[in-house]
């Protein structure tokens, strides 16, 4: 499956952004989907994930209550709504697809990755 992330940009602290990830190729609904991020000089870290059906989600503690992951299997899309953004949210955000039923925070379970989209939050 091919993944294309978009929607990143520059936003002030407290603002919002919505990231999108378009999937093509294999059956989208067979994959749990996730968002990860990598800040300069840091390792890639888990942000959020959603199950195949969209009914179950999982979030990193750092984004709980601020970010919402969702998916539209009819459109082969997954989204990350980011509210109350903080400067520490600045990173390149990647979407990934895992051949799992439930959402997973484990990077090694992801089979496919998008190219990343830059999110910069200014203070």
Image (spheres, rainbow, N blue to C red):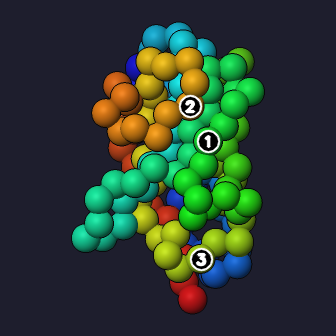
The local secondary structure at tag 2 comes to loop
Residue displayed at 47% across by 40% down: 105
Q: Which residue is mark 3?
A: 86
Vertical order, 21 against 6 (above or below):
above
Residue displayed at 36% across by 43% down: 115
Residue 103: which numbered mark, if any? Answer: 2
Residue 58: which numbered mark, if any? Answer: 1
CB under 8 Å between discs 1 and 2: yes
The local secondary structure at tag 1 comes to strand
- Residues packed near mark 1 inside 10 Å, few (<14), some (14 to 19) or many (20 plus): some
Where residue 77 appears, as percent x and y from the top left, is 62, 30
Image quadrant of residue 43?
A: bottom left
Instruction: Answer with left or right where residue 42 lies relative to residue 45.
Output: left
Where residue 23 appears, as percent x and y from the top left, is 51, 26
Residue displayed at 57% across by 89% down: 123
Distance from label 1 to label 3 (Cα)?
20 Å
Sequence order check, earlier mark of 1 and 2: 1
Q: Tell me the quarter of the image containing the N terminus.
A: top left
Image quadrant of residue 84?
A: bottom right
């Amino acid at each position: 499956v091919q993944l294309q992330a978009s929607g990143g940009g520059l936003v002030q602290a407290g603002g919002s952004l919505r990231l999108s990830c378009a999937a093509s190729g294999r059956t989208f609904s067979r994959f749990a989907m996730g968002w990860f991020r990598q800040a300069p000089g840091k390792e890639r870290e888990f942000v959020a994930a959603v199950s195949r059906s969209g009914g179950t989600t999982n979030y990193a503690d750092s984004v709980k209550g601020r970010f919402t992951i969702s998916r539209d299997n009819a459109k082969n899309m997954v989204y990350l709504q980011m509210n109350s953004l903080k400067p520490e949210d600045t990173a390149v955000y990647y979407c990934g697809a895992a051949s799992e039923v439930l959402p997973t925070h484990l990077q090694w379970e992801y089979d496919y990755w998008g190219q990343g989209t830059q999110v910069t939050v200014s203070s």
